[in-house]
Image: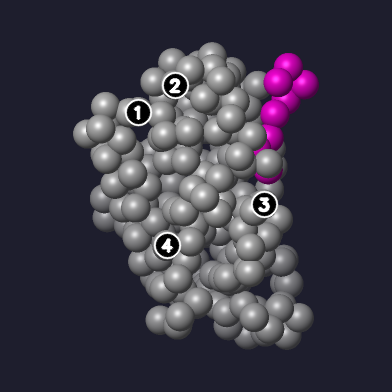
């Protein structure tokens, strides 16, 4: 695997760069997976944070999505449609990027069915992910995932997620790579390896916070 791929785990779990805090992200994902907007009060109660801590943590991720009532509807996992459909226990949700679909089943401890669309051909890619067994099916088997390593990840959705797609095959990704020369594509299995490293890093952060009796790291 290339340097681009191996660097991502460290960068994407660095709160100082992305703003993402596992102490808030994981509880938020586990609330959003039920398919309903989440209030700041709900998140604070589950995460063990004060309201001010939650608000600061959410503000550190400027791409966080809200509804008209100010409730949270997306941070990686979202209630708003994207090209990456993510179905858990019959609940149809979406993710900001292809890599999210491989990370979230383990963080949620729930299997997921993924259906994404190639940004070049418009053809579907279907993946099934189990929190323990990992990727259990990929259609087509030649599917790839694009990765980028932006200079800065101050806005994770625009600088990273919006460039992380599924493609049906290397040749399907060729035109996209031609206009994104700093990117690369890897197999779904390789992308899942990166996702597993990210998952472990996020869970380790929450374990460390619990050990320090500090559930909210904002």
Q: Is residue 115 left or right of residue 214?
A: right
Would you place residue 23 above or below residue 119 in this image?
above
Mark-to-mark CA distance, 3 and 1: 24 Å
Q: Is residue 15 magenta?
A: no
Residue ID at (68%, 60%): 159
Residue labelled with disc 1: 215
Asked if the residues shown at circle 1 and circle 4 are in contact, with their CB atoms under 8 angstroms apart, the answer is: no
Q: How busy is the neighbourhood of tag 3: few (under 14 within 10 Å), some, or many (20 plus)? A: some
Residue 165 picture location, percent across and down: 62, 64
Q: Is residue 64 magenta?
A: yes
Would you place residue 217 above or below residue 20 in this image?
above
Q: How busy is the neighbourhood of tag 2: few (under 14 within 10 Å), some, or many (20 plus)? A: many
Q: Earlier in the sequence, mark 1 or mark 4?
A: 4
Residue 49's disc number = 2
Image quarter where the N terminus lies is bottom left
Residue ID at (34%, 53%): 201
Mark-to-mark CA distance, 2 and 4: 25 Å
Residue ID at (56%, 51%): 18
- SS state under label 4: helix
Would you place residue 112 above or below residue 138 in this image?
above
Residue 149 seen by the camera: yes
Q: How busy is the neighbourhood of tag 1: few (under 14 within 10 Å), some, or many (20 plus)? A: many
Residue 155's disc number = 3
**Segment tinted magenta in the rendering:** 63-70
Residues 169 and 151: in front is: 151
Q: As drawn, which residue projects farthest toward the left?
A: 211
Residue 74 seen by the camera: no
Residues 83 and 121: in front is: 83
Residue labelled with disc 4: 10
């Amino acid at each position: 695997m290339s340097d681009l791929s191996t660097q991502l785990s460290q960068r994407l779990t660095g709160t100082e760069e992305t703003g993402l805090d596992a102490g808030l992200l994981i509880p938020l994902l586990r609330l959003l997976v039920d398919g309903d907007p989440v209030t700041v009060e709900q998140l604070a109660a589950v995460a063990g944070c004060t309201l001010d801590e939650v608000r600061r943590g959410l503000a550190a991720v400027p791409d966080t999505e809200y509804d008209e009532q100010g409730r949270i509807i997306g941070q990686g996992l979202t209630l708003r449609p994207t090209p990456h459909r993510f179905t858990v226990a019959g609940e149809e949700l979406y993710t900001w990027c292809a890599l999210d679909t491989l990370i979230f089943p383990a963080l949620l401890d729930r299997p997921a069915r993924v259906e994404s669309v190639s940004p070049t051909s418009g053809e579907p890619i279907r993946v099934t992910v189990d929190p323990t067994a990992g990727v259990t099916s990929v259609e087509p088997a030649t599917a790839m995932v694009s990765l980028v390593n932006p200079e800065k990840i101050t806005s994770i959705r625009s600088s990273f997620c919006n460039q992380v797609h599924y493609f049906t095959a290397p040749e399907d990704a060729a035109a996209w790579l031609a206009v994104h020369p700093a990117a690369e594509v890897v197999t779904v299995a390789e992308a899942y390896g990166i996702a597993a490293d990210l998952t472990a890093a996020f869970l380790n952060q929450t374990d460390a916070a619990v050990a320090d009796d500090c559930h909210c790291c904002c």
